[in-house]
Amino acid sequence: MKLHRLTLRNYRGITFRDIEFPDRGIVVVSGANEIGKSSMIEALDLLLDAKDRSGKKEVKQVKPTHVDEGAEVTAEISTGPYRFTYFKRYHKRPVTELTVTAPAREQWTGDEAHDRVLAILAETVDVRLWEAQRVLQASATSPVDLSGCDALSRALDVAAGQSVSLTGSASTGSGLSGSEPLLIDRIDGEFKKYFTSTGRPTGEWAAAGKHRQVTADTVEACRRAVAEIDEAVARHGTLTSDLAAVAAERDAAVRRLEAARLRADAVAKIAGRLEQARVLADAAATSHAAASAAVDERHRLAAELARDEAAIVGLEAELVQAVDHEIAARSALTNAADAATAAAVDVETAQAEVEAARTVVEQIARRGEADSLAVRIKKIDATDAGLRTAAAELGEIRLTDRSMRLIEKAAAEVDVATAAADAASARIELVAATDVAVDVDGEPVSLPAGDTWVTSATSPTEVSVPGVLTVRVVPGAPAAHTGEALEAKRQVLARALDEAGVVDVAAARVLDGHRRETAALAQRLQAARDAHAGDDDVEALRARLAQLRADLPAGESPTADQARAAFDAAATAHRQKRTAATELRDAAATSATRAAELAARSEGVRTAVASARTRMTTLADRLERGRATAGDDELTLAASAAADRLRDTTASVRELAAEFDGAHPAAVTAEFDQAAAHEALLSRRHDELAEQLVRTEAELGVYGTEGRRGRLDEALLEHGYAEGTWLRLKRRAHAVMTLRSVMARHRDDARQRYVDPFRIEVERLGRIVFGADFEVEIDAELRIQSRTLDGCTVPYDSLSGGAKEQLGIVARLAGSALVAKEDGVPVVIDDALGFSDAERLSRMAEVFDAVGGDGQIIVLTCSPERYAGVIDAHRIELTAAGQPAGAAFG
């Protein structure tokens, strides 16, 4: 398959674009981002896959927004023996047109044209290979999957020497055309009659299995129904005998319950008499307790009254002593408070003296700061003056580092040119026998007797002795040429000296040394100024100095040692007085606390005396009222009578309790409860059995009308037929599965043999990029598993993005190189190699040149410089106007 021409009109944002592709080789289509490079491949896919009236999302997305027209796509394609032009318009007035020009002319429209193109592609194009041979932006680093490409499989079979098809028959020398039905396909077809892709039963065998299970379930249901009849008959006999036995047991239980009830009634009567006796005993005990409590209360009140009278006498004596102590404490508190107040006044006076001494010390410190600041500002002013002087000197010098380098370079070139001129020109040497004056090129030269004057004749030179002779020296061509060069170099040197403001090279060197010394001095002065000023602003320092001087007092001040001594003495006196004041204040506080404690004690004693008198009065009133009601002797006689009644009632309770215990009430109650529970249980069991017997008799009556045994025989016959059918299909299915597994194993072995040609081609191309020691491991599905460089093996997933991208392109180009010419499809690379460095890009260009061949490789990119190294490339540049800007062969 080859793409010869692609035309887009009103497609997304593309108004019009028409590109003609060469039949073979590499095409680099370049353009800016969002100019529609990827849209070209999208448009080709849409043309081949989607009908013109399709409502797919992909079709709706390409509708133009800048015009009210439908998107149009036209492609001229050749594949196998066919060459055709295919046109579609989407969205508005949809149209499909197909014109086949070879091998015979055909014309189709509408859905018939769409179906005809699909038929041609199905006949001649390996669709899996067409999809795999693309490197798109979103999947540039994903591993290429060539496992399902029949065209590549055929090519690898031929390359590996495998001329035997999977049908088991040897070829007669010609390769497979791709249209022969393979045995493995027929086996797969037979396998799919019995199994799904996951190996589960399907089709006729699945239906037979379901029918077998349904009949088995039916047989089981019929068996359970017959078993229900047998179970009901057995249950009827069991229920009849059980019901008779339970009726006999219930009669015995009723008689036992009646006897237990009589014994329980007798025990209940004894318990009633015992309860009455206990009530009378409790009442007697209550009366006895009340009489005894009244006697005890009368005695307690009399004793407490006597104790309170004695306590009041002691409290009154304690009160007199507490009042005396309180008066003494208050006097001591007054004296301590006066002393503390006087000490506080002394502390304030000492504090004032300390503050005065501190003020003197701070003034002396400010004076020292002012002196230090004045020295610092003086140094800054001195460095500023030096900096201004250095800046003025540097400003007058026009010579710079650059101009000095130019002068040195020009001087060196002049020296070289002079040496060359001297070597190429004649030397003029004048020796004076006597004092003589000569003219050299019009310039007077005086020669004392015995002196020698020498020059080189690099240009026409005239030496004359005025009035005597003239000698003209004309140099040859080489000397003239070197002379011209020398003069040019001298002019360059003269211009450089003039720009620097010096007369010669020596003066320039002297001036450059002076400039460097001055610049170095300026740097040292600037460093000194920075050290003196630090991070402070100089004007702020001046303002601070003025403020310090303004704050200093006029007149003489004590020395720093004197001021510090005075401050230390004042501070010591202040601490001593403050310590004494603190001690006096603590003593006053202690006196206050003592006075408060004694006052509180006096008040507490007074309160206790008053409380004791009140309590004594209350006790005397209560005792008087009680004796008015009943005298002490009367209470004693009443308590004795209550004790007699308590003894009589307690004896009666003991006698009845002994009688009650002798009747064994717990055993009687337990026997009655057991008899009642047993009788109730047997009654419930009798009723349940009777109900179950009635229900079983009704079920047997219904079962007799249903014919369950006949249905069981019919179900057994149907299940036997279904079981036989299922076993027959099972044998066939397992046979197909065994055959398929054997053929798959042989096919995998064959695939492993044809992996080698693909690996060899990948390594051949990869060594251009990665080096001579490049190796790859490829599985049976033709996927790259790992890469080896310098003996180091790295899994594919662990490689860098750039390496994955490069390997993906190499694998696709290797596949393109191996596929037969008639099976080839275009390799499309959309904006790849973005992760590659300059060296790898250069090597990838060599790979593209190595596989140009008869195949068609289309590269879409926004960075054409990535592919500048591809020599045999046809280049097309896209512009915003829609048409290619130009095309050129590399």
Image (cartoon, rainbow, N blue to C red):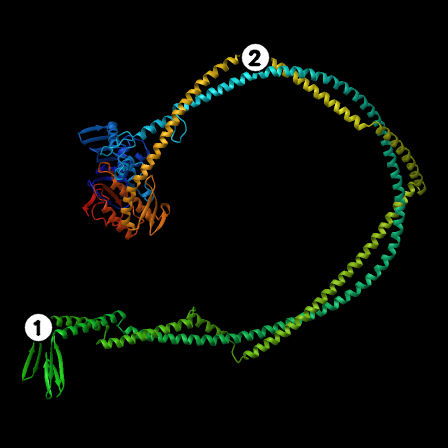
Residue 629 higher or lower than 685, as above or below? below
**Residue drawn at point x = 38 percent, y = 27 percent:** 735
Q: Amino acid at mark 1?
A: Gly
Q: Nearer the viewer, residue 581 or 826?
A: 826
In depth, the one of 41 and 24 nearer the eye is 24
In the figure, 674 relative to 751: above or below? above
Name the residue located 89 percent from the left edge and 51 percent from the top edge.
306
Q: Residues within 10 Å of mark 1 (few under 14, many from 20)?
A: some
- Relative placement, left or right, of 800 versus 657 is left
Q: CA distance from mark 1 to mark 2?
A: 149 Å
Kind of residue sitting beneath label 2? Val
Q: Is residue 886 left or right of residue 586?
A: left
Q: Which residue is mark 1?
A: 476
Q: In x, y percent, where is residue 164?
A: 27, 34
Q: Which image quarter: residue 54? A: top left
Quadrant holding the N terminus: top left
Q: Is residue 432 visible?
A: yes
Where is 409 relative to 631, above or below?
below
Ranked by sequence position, the earlier of labels 1 and 2 is 1
Where does residue 438 sit, x and y in percent of width and height? 10, 83
Is residue 831 at all visible to an observer of this figure?
Answer: no
Residue sitting farthest toward the left: 468
Residue 135, quarter of the rendered image: top left
State the SS at label 1: loop
> Where is residue 643 shown, x and y percent of the image?
91, 37
Q: Which residue is mark 2?
A: 702
The nearer-to-camera label among 1 and 2 is 2
Element under disc 2: helix
Residue 672 located left or right of residue 534: right
Q: Position of residue 377 (x, y in %)?
A: 42, 74
At label 2, counting other C-alpha atoms closer than 10 Å, the crowd grade (few under 14, some 14-19, many 20 or more) is: few
